[in-house]
Image (cartoon, grey):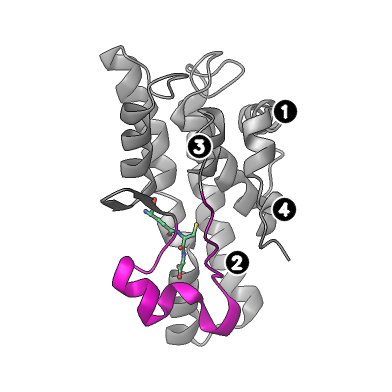
Amino acid sequence: MRIALHHKGIDYDYRPIHLVKDGGEQRKDDYLSLNPKGEVPFFIDGELKLGQSMAILLYIEDRWSERPLFPKNAAEMAKCIQVCEIINSGIQPIQNLAVMHEVKRRYNLNDEEKVDWSRFWIQKGLDALEKVLGPLAGKFCLGNGLTAADLFLVPQVYNGKKFGVNFSGLPLISKINDSCLELESFKLADPSCQPDSP
Ligand SMILES: N[C@@H](CCC(=O)N[C@@H](CS)C(=O)NCC(=O)O)C(=O)O
């Protein structure tokens, strides 16, 4: 979401939610009253209060149509969503903090086993995505133009690196990630550049 806001040059207020401190601010009542799902991002625009990054991106795309992030052609749009969803519904949820926490608690895992769970699912998902991207990718996921697919890919690669995923068999994904990280919008959205970064 941050990448899209910077890409489109939208001015925004950033309200940090610390996901770990004190058991996670996303699990506190005041945040849950805003977003019962207890996750970030959450987007507010006037009366609109919106969770889920795909919903937020589609809203931003419609409201600020300059510098589009979704293809207009139906087949290309479907391909773009395919890539987004491999990450957004096929990888990210299984390696999320809440899932790691619950898997650890239920099966009495240690921290290394907990991380191994997430690493396994990210590796499996990115290995498949590398094959899907084969006929699609150029400089970015879909040819040489930036799309929403790249906005999902880069944060997932970031998490993959954090959890020790092996990128040696993922040359396409690595190359796309590098191309994205050269762009100003990705630099400004990087976690290390946020006001609450430790
Ligand atoms: N499907 C949601 C996923 C949101 C999500 O899982 N966000 C993570 C951070 S990237 C989170 O808030 N995790 C908190 C937790 O698991 O407790 C979306 O696309 O917005």
Residue at point 31%, 52% (across, down): 50
Which callout, 4 or 2, points at the residue further toward the start of the chain? 2
In the image shown, does 106 or 64 lie closer to the viewer?
A: 64
Residue at point 52%, 60% (across, down): 15
Residue assigned mark 2: 116
In what quadrant does ligand 1 lie?
Answer: bottom left
**Where's residue 169, x and y in %?**
66, 36
SS label for mark 3: helix
SS label for mark 2: helix
What's the CA distance linking mark 2 and mark 3? 33 Å
In the image shown, does 66 or 69 lie closer to the viewer?
A: 66
Give the quadrant of residue 14: bottom right
Q: Is residue 49 left or right of residue 24?
A: left
Q: Is residue 192 left or right of residue 54?
A: right
**Where's residue 40, x and y in %?**
44, 59
Q: Are marks 4 and 2 in contact (CB under 8 Å)?
A: no
What's the CA distance linking mark 1 and mark 4? 15 Å
Q: Is residue 133 left or right of residue 158?
A: left
Q: Which residues are magenta?
A: 13-40
Which callout, 2 or 3, points at the residue further toward the start of the chain? 3
Residue assigned mark 4: 192
Residue assigned mark 1: 182
